[in-house]
């Protein structure tokens, strides 16, 4: 008992004579009374005493502070992202989406020229928060920084878009923007404890989204729906993603694959052919291969499987795949999947984006003119490009915005394209009302023997 009493005295704030220690003085040192000498014996400490001894040490070890929000990087399934067009119906179909992250939010991401697509599963009571660095330069560096927050209210998903201006004198500032918000389509559904969203972000006339392969920064988070907006100066750890048309995973050492050429489109009802070229510098044991389409294109095309062909004297081998695409195939970007099985049984996968396209695509020679205080006459060329190997004979019609007028007596032009995948140019004249400014849709319709293709091009009248 004596050591315990000594401990109590050491922690008592009293002087040697028993009076309280003055506020500005230190307690006098106290020496604990010595216990009578006893023979030395070896005894085990009781379990209760051991627990009491360990308790102060456990209390002293404070838990590590949680890292600031947006600092812990997303766990990304794959940094190379393929062009792939989903169906926005609020349901995540089989092989429709390319997984991006797991954790607090299971998210998906893919792209196509001029569009970005996101999807996710979010817990009820949480919002989805998507950070975009379209320049791929870092969250607080340069332009092209956007935040898209998806929140559910009264059963409806509402996108809230802010742009981060990093160039202001007083530091980064949030700027509310309606331009990108107007280019967002989002649908969703409720599934028990989760809600699901599917979203497309369309470039329109903004000219900020990639039109081809590029590198961008992306981050996806889940935050409580009552959490206030984050301060603009806070850093965010972004995942750098490569937007591409090809990717491969798991090819054995010594086996090299060359990506396909630039011809990546097919019209429903026509044939499509691809060739994979492989180069081997070593003896690689490759057993067989399988090629098929993914998603809803799988049932509209041919699937094949065969032993892998041998290598020639230069170490080259070729895989050819040819298929007819059903007339009922839906348009958009799809994936052709090639699986290669090696001698150890580990599969390697090659994926290529393929566009199921309309018969023709339409582009214009100019999409921006200055505003005028008077009526303005504008002439522009329209290029009609064929996506088929057959002759194309059709009519191109233009629907101008309200109060605009198509000159020349008619809003339609006949055209014939003789060459496979060729193009022709037609000219339209329009009259724009005085003092007009903004972004307006030009709606083109191509009628080719009863097959109709529609395309909207955004035209800017700038102050």
Image (tube, rainbow, N blue to C red):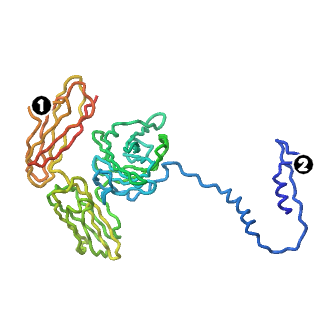
Residue 18: which disc?
2
User: Which residue is pictured at 44% across the width and 45% down the height?
Assistant: 139
- Does residue 423 sit above or below 281 in this rendering? above
The x and y percentages for residue 127 are 43, 47
Q: Determine whether, in the image, residue 250 is placed left or right of residue 61.
A: left
Q: Position of residue 210 (x, y in %)?
A: 31, 47
Res 1 → quadrant: bottom right
**Residue 436 sits above or below residue 43 on the image:** above
Sequence-wise first label, 1 or 2: 2
Q: Give the crowd class for mark 1: few <14, some 14-19, many >=20 residues within 10 Å.
A: some
Count the marks. Answer: 2
Question: Which element type, helix, strand or loop, lies under badge 2?
Answer: loop
Element marked by disc 1: loop
* 1 vs 2, front mark: 2
The residue carrying mark 1 is 407
Q: CA distance from mark 1 to mark 2?
A: 108 Å
Q: Which residue shows up at 18% across the image and 44% down it?
A: 454
Residue 360 placed where, x, y %?
15, 48
Q: Is residue 181 visible?
A: yes
Does any portion of residue 311 appear in the rendered image?
Answer: no
The residue shown at (34%, 40%) is 181
Quarter residue 310 falls in? bottom left
In this rendered view, identify the residue nearer to me: 202 or 134: 202
Rendered location of residue 114, percent (x, y): 28, 46
């Amino acid at each position: 008992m004596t050591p315990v009493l000594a401990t109590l005295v050491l922690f008592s704030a009293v002087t040697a004579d028993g009076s309280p220690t003055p506020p500005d003085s230190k307690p006098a040192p106290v020496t604990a009374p010595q216990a009578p000498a006893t023979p030395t014996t070896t005894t085990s400490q009781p379990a209760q005493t051991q627990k009491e001894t360990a308790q102060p040490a456990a209390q002293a070890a404070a838990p590590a502070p949680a890292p600031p929000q947006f600092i812990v990087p997303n766990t990304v399934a794959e940094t190379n992202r393929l062009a792939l067009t989903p169906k926005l119906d609020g349901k995540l179909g089989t092989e429709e989406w390319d997984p991006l992250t797991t954790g607090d939010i299971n998210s998906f991401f893919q792209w196509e020229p001029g569009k970005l697509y996101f999807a996710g599963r979010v817990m009820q009571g949480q919002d989805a928060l998507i950070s975009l660095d379209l320049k791929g330069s870092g969250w607080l560096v340069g332009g092209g920084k956007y935040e898209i927050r998806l929140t559910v209210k009264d059963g409806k998903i509402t996108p809230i878009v802010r742009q981060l201006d990093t160039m202001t004198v007083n530091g980064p500032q949030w700027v509310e923007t309606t331009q990108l918000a107007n280019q967002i389509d989002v649908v969703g559904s409720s599934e028990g404890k989760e809600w699901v969203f599917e979203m497309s972000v369309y470039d329109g006339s903004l000219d900020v989204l990639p039109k081809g392969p590029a590198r961008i920064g992306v981050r996806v988070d889940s935050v409580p729906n009552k959490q206030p907006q984050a301060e603009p100066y806070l850093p965010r750890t972004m995942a750098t993603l490569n937007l591409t048309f090809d990717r491969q995973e798991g090819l054995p050492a010594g086996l090299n694959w060359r990506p396909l050429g630039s011809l990546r489109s097919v019209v429903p009802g026509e044939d499509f052919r691809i060739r994979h070229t492989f180069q081997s510098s070593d003896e690689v044991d490759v057993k067989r291969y399988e090629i098929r389409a993914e998603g809803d294109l799988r049932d509209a095309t041919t699937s094949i499987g065969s032993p892998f062909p041998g290598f020639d004297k230069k170490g080259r081998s070729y895989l050819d795949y040819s298929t007819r695409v059903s007339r009922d195939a839906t348009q958009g970007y799809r994936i052709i999947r090639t699986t290669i099985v090696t001698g150890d049984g580990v599969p390697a996968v090659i994926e290529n984006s393929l566009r199921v396209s309309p018969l023709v695509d339409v582009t214009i020679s100019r999409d921006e003119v200055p505003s005028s205080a008077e009526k303005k006459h504008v002439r522009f060329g329209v290029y009609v490009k064929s996506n088929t190997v057959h002759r194309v004979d059709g009519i191109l019609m233009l629907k101008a915005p309200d109060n605009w007028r198509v000159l020349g007596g008619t809003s339609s032009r006949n055209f014939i394209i003789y060459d496979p995948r060729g193009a022709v140019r037609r000219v339209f004249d329009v009259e724009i009302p005085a003092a007009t400014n903004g972004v307006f849709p030009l709606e083109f319709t191509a009628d080719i023997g009863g097959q109709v293709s529609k395309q909207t091009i955004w035209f800017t009248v700038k102050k």
